Amino acid sequence: MANIHEYLIWRGDVPFEISPFNEVDGLVLSELAYANFSGVVADENESVTIEEARRRFWALHTPQEIMAINSYTKTAPFLMDEMAGKARFGGTILSNYYDVVDTDSDVQLSAITFHLPDGTVFVAFRGTDDTIVGWKEDFNMSYLPETEGQRRAVKYLNDHWINSSAPLRLGGHSKGGNLAVYAAVCAAPEIRNRIIAVYNNDGPGFLDAFTNTKAYKDMLPRIICIEPEDCVIGSLLSSEAYQHIVKSTSFGIVQHDGFSWEVLGTRFVEVKKRSELSVFLETTVRQWLSEQAVETRRTFVNTLFSLLASTGHENISEIKNDIPAALSRMKKMLDTMPREQRDKSWNMLIQLFSKGAGNLLQETRKGLMAVLENWTSAKPEKNPKPGEEA
């Protein structure tokens, strides 16, 4: 079964006039947003073709360097090799590159705009990177009505497209999908009216206060929510959008990797429902969060990421490569915390595990009862009398 790399190899010569923009194209551009375009698209005022972007990127980096990166999105730049010079994406113009990581404001945001050969524009927001601040911003969504990244995503859209008449599509993978939806809903009315579709590729949802707004409900028919069978990230918080559940060549949370999603022709291979694992995790986390006060959530998130920051590292991968020393620094930090803050965080974790254990026990009981019911309701076989046929 194909993935998006193979999709571009097989379909790259088919222009949009023959085969219109589809959900797979949306993931291609959302994943390409993970590429580091620093020094490639110099600033928000520069525009370059995808052919020139490819040339500049590989002048700055080697394939070996890219493949050595510890990230499931590392193959994103290679998409340009399959797009440049082809009928479908050849001549696409990249512009308005924006990339910022700000620990003071808890924001990790990157966006880029693709001007496609069919005359439409695709605004792509990058998902969570390897930085600790990027992951903290994701967790902030559990209690903040608006994160700094969401606010800046709206500003990015308004700043660049308020005076344009071009038809727009927005998209992103992981947190990028959340930012795309948020920006679409909160953009100026003249921009919202030009939005064709918003592609949320396994991005987390929102607090109920946001999904209950009129602006969100008006945008809902244009939100295309795509999630893998073992969805974890995309099931967090509320969405209400129809979920397209797709097959993946991976298992568990690793299915979050969009490069593992199976493609057939111009569509993803869909299944009828999410896996039991995904539903179990969603139920557990949502029940757990619903029982926590906003201030308790804030304390938990700040405590967790204070501990991660105490390691002296800026990236998650650096911590994984330095676990003994990192754990030692986190323990010292934990020992100096106010007792009340420490106890609140521990209690929240204990409640999460208790909730998971309770749900697991309940599901096990349901399964056993179903087996028992099937067994007792089954009709016993009738033994034939002597001389009768069985």
Image: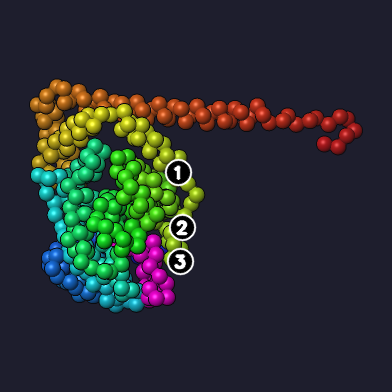
* Residue at 14% in and 65% down: 44
The answer to whether residue 31 shows anywhere in this view is no
Give the number of marks.
3
- For label 1, the residue is 275
Dot 1: element: loop
Magenta span includes 28: yes
Q: The disc labelled 2 sits on which kind of residue?
A: Val
10 Å crowding of disc 3: few (<14), some (14-19), many (20+) = few
In the rendered view, would you say 191 is above or below 298? Answer: below
The answer to whether residue 181 shows anywhere in this view is yes
Question: Residue 100, located in which quarter of the rendered image?
Answer: bottom left
10 Å crowding of disc 1: few (<14), some (14-19), many (20+) = some
| Numbered circle sitting on residue 297 | none
Q: Percent position (x, y) of residue 166?
A: 28, 69
Magenta span includes 285: no
* Residue at 39% in and 61% down: 23
| Nearer to me, 148 or 324 | 148
Q: Percent position (x, y) of residue 51?
A: 23, 75
| Numbered circle sitting on residue 265 | 3
| Nearer to me, 139 or 168 | 168
How far is disc 3 from disc 2 in space, using C-alphas?
9 Å
* Picture quarter with the N terminus: bottom left
In the rendered view, would you say 106 is above or below 16? Answer: above
- For label 2, the residue is 269
Whether residue 206 sits left or right of residue 134 in the image: it is right
Dot 3: element: loop
Q: Residue furthest right?
A: 387
Q: Percent position (x, y) of residue 148?
A: 17, 47
Q: The disc labelled 1 sits on which kind of residue?
A: Ser
The residues colored magenta run: 7-30
| Nearer to me, 372 or 21 | 21
